[in-house]
Image (spheres, rainbow, N blue to C red):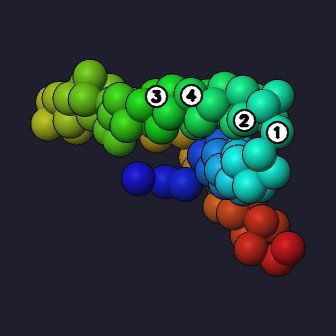
Amino acid sequence: MRVDEKYISQYDKISNMKKNSSENTKSGDGLKEKSSSVAKSQVSSLIDRVKSTPDVRKEIVDQIRNQIEAGTYTISGKKVAEKIVGAAINNLF
C-alpha cells in the first residue's frame, strides 16, 4: 500500500486526539472528560473507516490485468515522465 499524505495527516490527527484525550482525563474536570469521550468516539470512527478501506481496488486491478492479457493496455509516456519527475522532486525535499 502506498502511504499518501492523506493517511499521514489522518494518523497525526488521531495521535493528537489520543494525546489530548489522555491529558483531559488527568485533569478530572467534567467538561474535559465529556470532550475526551467525544474525541475517543471520533478516533474510534476514524480507525473503523481506515480499517474498512481496502488496500487494493480490486475492480481496477482486474480491469488492468485483463487489458494487459488482451494486449490492449496502453501507457501514456507523458504521464510516466510526469510521475518520475514528480517523484524525483519530492525526494529532493
Lower position in the chain sequence, tag 4 or tag 2? 2
Residue at image location 72% in from the left, 35% down from the top = 33
Q: Residues within 10 Å of mark 3 (few under 14, many from 20)?
A: few
Q: Distance between the residues labelled 3 and 4?
A: 12 Å
Label 3–label 1 contact, CB within 8 A = no
Q: Nearer the viewer, mark 4 or mark 1?
A: 1
Element on which disc 4 rests: helix
Q: Is residue 16 above or below residue 50?
A: below
Q: Nearer the viewer, residue 23 or 61?
A: 23
Q: Residue 79 carries which label?
A: none
Q: Residue 29 carries which label?
A: 1
Q: Mark 4 points at which residue?
A: 41
Residue 64 visible in the picture: no
Q: Distance between the residues labelled 1 and 2?
A: 6 Å
Lower position in the chain sequence, tag 3 or tag 1? 1
Q: What residue type is labelled 4?
A: Ser
- Residue 11: x %, y % from top left: 63, 50
Q: Which amino acid does label 2 sit on?
A: Glu
Residue at image location 63% in from the left, 31% down from the top = 37
Q: In this view, does 49 lie to the left or right of 8?
A: left
